[in-house]
Amino acid sequence: MTKCKVIALANQKGGTAKTTTTLNLGIGLAHQGRKVLLVDADPQGDLTTALGWINADSLPITLETQMKKILQDEPFVYNEGILHHEEGVDIIPTNIELSGMEISLVNAMSREQTLKLYLSDLKKDYDYILIDCMPSLG
């Protein structure tokens, strides 16, 4: 059984320091020797940008790419596309394409489980998974 803790930093209002908290908490935990995965689940991609990936639109694999494969029952490598940062954290990046995912999820069976399914395989590799959520209830 995994001891990984998954924490979603969420608030339906923007500008409440969700991204800043996710970033600082993640790096702080990494400096304490924990294995940390950050998930940028906000299509604005500010967490991805804050860690130095300025042109996220050019990244071949993002959160949206992996979730789309799950929805379409396509095979995927669970840790493919994870980026490693010098501060000791890993990140699943995102870009604006994630905003279209909400439309795809509307008619999907078990849509609430898509992200959970994706992260379930990753939990064995990390002590903490921190999710920077978008400022909405989507």
Image (spheres, rainbow, N blue to C red):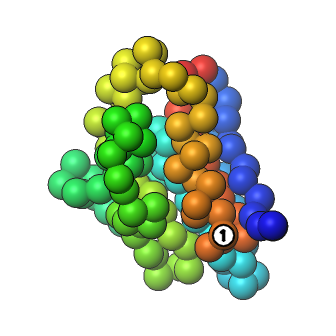
What SS does tag 1 mark?
helix
- The residue singled out by tag 1 in the image is 124
Q: In this view, does 107 lie to the left or right of 33?
A: left
On the rendered image, what quadrant is the N terminus found in?
Answer: bottom right
Q: Is residue 51 left or right of residue 37?
A: left
Above or below — where is 39 with respect to 26?
A: above
Q: In which quarter of the image is residue 104?
A: top left
Q: Residue furthest top?
A: 107
Above or below — where is 57 with respect to 30?
A: above
**Residue 45 placement (x, y as % from top left):** 40, 45
**Residue 87 placement (x, y as % from top left):** 53, 79
Could one spot residue 26 in this view of the protein?
no
Above or below — where is 27 with respect to 95?
A: below
Toward the viewer: 14 or 32? 32
On the rendered image, what quadrant is the C terminus found in?
Answer: top right
Q: Residue at x 38, y 40 (%)?
A: 73
Amino acid type at circle 1 is Lys
**Residue 74 placement (x, y as % from top left):** 33, 46
Q: Residue at x 58, y 63 (%)?
A: 122
Q: Is residue 94 left or right of residue 109?
A: left
Within 10 angstroms of label 1, few (less than 14), some, or many (20 or more) residues? Answer: few
Q: Which residue is drawn at 22% across and 48% down?
A: 57
Q: In which quarter of the image is residue 29?
A: bottom right
Q: Residue at x 68, y 43 (%)?
A: 9
Could one spot residue 130 in this view of the protein?
yes
**Residue 125 placement (x, y as % from top left):** 62, 73
